[in-house]
Amino acid sequence: MLLTKSSEYAIRLVFHLNSREESFVRLKEIAKILEIPYYQLAKVANILIRHEILKSHTGPRGGVQLKIDISKTTLIKIVEPFEGDDIFNKCVLGLSVCGSDNPCPIHEYWGATKFEIVELFTVKSIKDLIEINNELTEKNILFSKT
């Protein structure tokens, strides 16, 4: 299971919006800061708005803002609109015939690791992950707080 660029951008966008104190932030500004192509970020944001993860406002003080409670929302809610609800049942290599009866070369290893990844996406809240990120950021490991 590898995430699409859209899912990666969605996660980065949610993390970034959480770090902002302004009520609404312009996508062009976010795209520049996160070094994400603006039009790709706009598509991702529109999908997140339709799934009620973000809200938007037009006008001079417009932009996007988080609509979710990050202490009650998990990563799966952020990536499902892009990956589908069967994200953890897909073959890591993208093979349609992969399964217990006809495993791909990675199938056995994925099965052993899958539980931990499913737990990360479905149990840990976005708030939990942001707190971990902030600890690692202080050590210059993960996303910057800007």
Image (cartoon, rainbow, N blue to C red):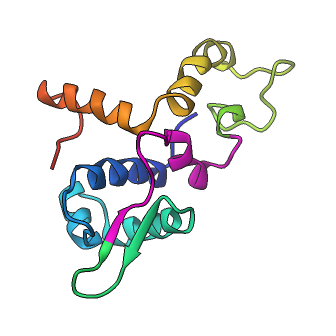
Q: Quadrant of residue 60?
A: bottom left
Q: In the rendered structure, which segment of residues is drawn in magenta? A: 64-86
Q: Residue furthest bottom?
A: 59
Question: Looking at the picture, does residue 143 appear above or below residue 115?
Answer: below
Q: Residue at x 36, y 37 (%)?
A: 127
Tell me, yes or no, whether the highlighted magenta stretch contains residue 66. yes
Judged left or right of residue 28, residue 140 is: left
Q: Position of residue 32 (x, y in %)?
A: 20, 64
Question: Looking at the picture, does residue 1 appear above or below residue 28?
Answer: above
Judged left or right of residue 59, residue 44 is: right
Q: Quadrant of residue 101?
A: top right
Q: Residue at x 31, y 65 (%)?
A: 37
Q: Nearer the viewer, residue 97 or 47?
A: 47
Q: Residue at x 27, y 69 (%)?
A: 24
| Quadrant of the snapshot with the N terminus | top right
Q: Nearer the viewer, residue 71 or 26?
A: 71
Q: Nearer the viewer, residue 84 or 66?
A: 66
Tell me, yes or no, whether the highlighted magenta stretch contains residue 6. no
Judged left or right of residue 4, residue 23 is: left
Q: Residue furthest right?
A: 101
Q: Residue at x 15, y 50 (%)?
A: 146
Q: How many numbered marks appear?
A: 0
Q: Position of residue 95 (x, y in %)?
A: 72, 36
Q: Position of residue 29 (x, y in %)?
A: 20, 68
Question: Looking at the picture, does residue 142 appear above or below residue 29?
Answer: above
Question: Looking at the picture, does residue 141 appear above or below residue 82?
Answer: above
Judged left or right of residue 124, residue 138 is: left
Q: Position of residue 119 (x, y in %)?
A: 55, 24
